[in-house]
Amino acid sequence: MELLAFGDTGWGDELFRATLMTIAVSITAMIIGFSFAAIFTPLKLSKNKFLNLLANSYTTVIRGVPELLVIYLFFFGGTGAVMYVASIFGYNEYIEINAFVTGAFAIGIISGAYSTEVFRGAVQSIDKGQFEAANVLGLGKFGKFFKIILPQTLRLAIPNLSNVWQITLKDTSLISVTGLVEIMRQSYIAAGSTRDPLFFYSFAAVLYLLLTFLSMKLINRLEIKYNKGY
Amino acid sequence: MDFELMINSFPKLLNAAVITLKLLSVSLIIGLFIGLIFAILRLNKNIFINRFAYGYSYLFRGTPLLVQIFIIYFGLGQIEYLRSTFLWVILKEPYWCAIIAFALNTGAYTSEILRSAFQTIKPGIIEAGQSLGISSKIIFYKIQIPIAIRQSLPAYGNEIILMMKGTSLASTVTIMDLTGVAKYIISTTFKPIEVFIVAGGIYLFMTFVIHNVIKFLEKKYSFN
C-alpha cells in the first residue's frame, strides 16, 4: 500500500494524474471521432458513388488495420506531414508535435470509423415516415435534419456509442508506446523503478475497470433520460 | 513515395504475417474452448459458478489487452514460486505469454457470444428433442451446440477480425509479428507511409479473406 502513497514516497499522485490523462485523451479522441463521423456519415448515406467509396474506404481501412499500426503511422509520420504542410506556407523550422495531440488524433480517427458506422446504422433505422412527415410539414433541409432526424439518431445511437467509448478508452492504453504518460505508461515507469510489475500492472487493470464501470453507469443514466418518451 | 522500399520490405512483412497468423490461429483454438466452457458455466443455475464466469468475462472485457499481456509477461515472472515450477518453461517465452493473454481475452468475448446464442435457442427445439426421447446430454451436444455455433457465426467472425488486430500487441513483448517488423522498418528507414501501406494492405487482405470465409460458412449452414 505504501507504493501508492501520495507525495515523494509513493506512486499514488503520479497514477492519479495518469488516470486524469487517460480520461482527457479518451474524451478528446471521442470528440475528434465525432467530427470525423459528422463528415463521413453523410458521405456514407449519400447517393453519389464516389463519396460513398471515399467513406467506405475510410471505415474499412481503419477497422481492418491494427490500432497499433495506425498509432505508429501518426507517431513516426505526424511530424513529417505537419512540416510538409508548413513548408508549403513557407515555414521551414522544425516542428515538434506533442504526444497528446498525436495520440488523441490517432485514436480519434479510429474511434471516428466506429462512430460513423454507428450513426449510419442509427439514421438508417429511423422510420421512413419521419422523413416524409418532415417534408410534408414543409421543414427546410436544416430544420428537417436538426429538429427531426438528429434527435432520433442520437437516441438510437447511444447504446452502440457506449461500446465505441469502451473501445476508445481501452485503445488509449496503446498510446503509451509514444511516451504519453497515461495509466499504462505510468505503470510501466513505476514497475521499472520499483521492480514490482505484477502490482502496478494489476493496479492499472483495476483503474481501467473502474473507468469502464463508472462510465457505463453514466451512460445508462443518459440512455434512460433519452428514452423517456418511449 | 519510395517504391523500392515498398517492394523490398514486402517479403519481410509477408514472412512476419505468417507469425501473426500462427498467433491468431493458436489463440483462437484455445480461446474457443475457454469460451465454450465459460458460456456453459454462465448458464449454470448455481449462483457462484454463474458469478465466477461473469466475473471472468467482465474482467477481460473491461481492461485493455495490453494490460493483460503485461501482467502475464512481466508480472507473473515476479512470483518466485512460479519460477520453480514447470510452468516457467512456458511463462518465460514471450510467444506463449502472448498466446495465453490472447486466448484468455478472446475466450471472454467468445463466452459472451456463445451464451447469447444458447439463450436465443427456442425452447420448442429442446422440447422436440425431449419428446423424441433423446437424453439431455445428446440434446445438448447434437442439438444445442450446433445451433448455437450457427447462431454465433456473424458475431464470431467479428471477434476473429478483432483478435487479428489484437495480435499486433505481441510486438510490445519483443515478438516480431507483422506490426513488429513494420515498426522496425519504419524506425530504421523513417518512411512510415510506405511501410504502413504495405503492412496495412496485408492486414486488410487477411481481414477480407476472414470476412468472406465467415460469409461462406453462414450461407452453407443457414437454416433455409
Image (spheres, coloured by chain):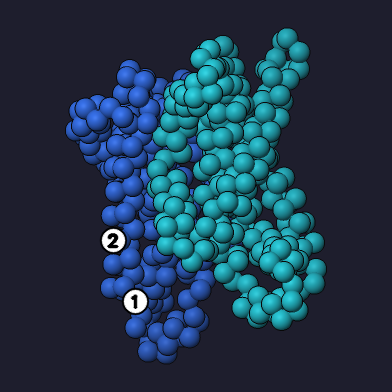
Residue B196, how many percent across, how many down?
Answer: 36, 34
Residue identified by numbered label 1: B222
Residue identified by numbered label 2: B213
**Three-letter amino acid code at the position of disc 2:** Val
At a point 35% along the width and 24% down the height, the residue shown is: B191
Number of numbered markers: 2
Mark 2: few, some, or many residues within 10 Å (few <14, many ≥20)? few
Residue B51, how many percent across, how many down?
Answer: 60, 54
Front residue of B16 and A119? A119
At a point 75% along the width and 50% down the height, the residue shown is: A218
At a point 72% along the width and 53% down the height, the residue shown is: A219
On-image quarter of the C terminus of chain A: bottom right
The answer to whether any part of residue B167 appears in the image is: yes
User: Position of A124 compared to B94: left or right?
Assistant: right
Q: Mark 2: which secondary structure?
A: helix
Mark 1: few, some, or many residues within 10 Å (few <14, many ≥20)? few
Residue A101, how many percent across, how many down?
Answer: 60, 28
Snapshot quadrant of residue B147: bottom left
Q: Which chain is blue?
A: B
The shade of chain A is cyan
**Three-letter amino acid code at the position of disc 1:** Ser
Front residue of A38 and B40? A38
Residue A166, how many percent across, how many down?
Answer: 60, 46
The answer to whether any part of residue B76 appears in the image is: no
On-image quarter of the N terminus of chain A: top right
User: Position of A73 compared to B202: left or right?
Assistant: right
At a point 61% along the width and 26% down the height, the residue shown is: A100
Instruction: Tell me which label, 1 or 2, sits earlier in the chain.
Output: 2
